[in-house]
Image (tube, helix red, strand yellow):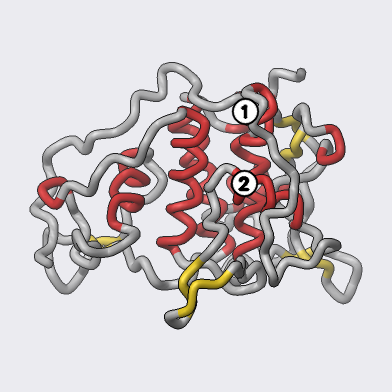
Amino acid sequence: GGGGGGGGSPRETINPSTPKLLFCLKKVEPEDYKDVPKDYDARKVIDTLSGTAYNGKFEEQRGETIFHGYPADDKSSVFRPQQDMIRSEFFKIAYYATCIADTLIKEDRLDTNSAGFEDVPSDYWARTIIDVLANVEILDKVRTIQGLRLAFNEPLRSITRAEAMKIFVEIYLTAQNEKLPAFSPAKNTFSDVNAGDWFAPYVQYGQKLGISQGFKNLDFAGTNFFDPNSFIKREEAAIWLYQFFITMEGKTIEEKRGVER
């Protein structure tokens, strides 16, 4: 498909004047990552997300921070901003930061029963999160993998940019009880997103939610590309989440979480 036209026209976005999701977060002491120096571009976003914890109605999960780092050899922590993010890690950050569990509790839709995934053991750390998201169809219970229909979640596989966008959009639509709008080729600004792609409506709606505007194509002026099948990096996932929150709440996480429950 052809690339999007030149800039100039304002892009359509969701009006953030009224908060769209319940709020359930509190400030905690952020981790100090030795691989995220003070002048690092995404330092503020990374600090904010590692210094914010779930504080909602699902009691067993209270105190869980949105983003964790990794222990380093010398007892310090590292964030690994350029490392690909695995699927279960992404499910976790989206789940906690959007307070989707609180929305489901409020509407009596929280279901922690097994979603039936053959590759998610009962003692896997993200098992409850995966079950809750799958039981409201934010995650697919059966997926086509190499031509086979399988009850596989692939929690340890790296997550693509298209898959990550789908999770955010599905959480938003679930919280709003809305349906995904059809893809509009006329509004498409990405040269690598086409009407037949499964992810096309999600990418378009995610763009409307202000999550990601993709990349400028330096080879073809006036076109953008989304790079849907590349794996999302941890830093990039943090930035998307931060942007998504601003669109939903009309405020940054720092501004919003100052209000203690």
**Which mark identifies residue 238?**
none
Q: Position of residue 212 (x, y in %)?
A: 38, 50
Viewer-side residue, 112 vs 88: 112
Residue 77: x percent and y percent? 80, 63
**Looking at the picture, which amino acid does disc 2 mark?**
Asn
Question: Which amino acid, by three-letter code, is at mark 1?
Answer: Thr
Looking at the image, residue 70 lies above or below residue 244: below
Q: Which residue is at 53% across, 48% downward? A: 138
Residue 1, relative to residue 256: is it above or below?
below
- Crowdedness of circle 2 by 10 Å Cα count: few (<14), some, many (20+)? some
Toward the bottom, the furthest residue is 146
Secondary structure at numbered mark 2:
helix
In the foreground, 57 or 89: 57
Q: On the picture, is 192 further left or further right than 252?
A: left
Position of the C terminus by quadrant: top right
Label 1 element class? helix
Q: Earlier in the sequence, mark 2 or mark 1?
A: 1
Q: Which residue is mark 1?
A: 103
Residue 197: x %, y % from top left:
27, 64
**Residue contact at pointers 2 and 1, CB within 8 angstroms:** no
Location of residue 136 in the rendering, given as x and y in whole percent from the top left corner: 57, 42
Q: Quadrant of residue 24?
A: top right
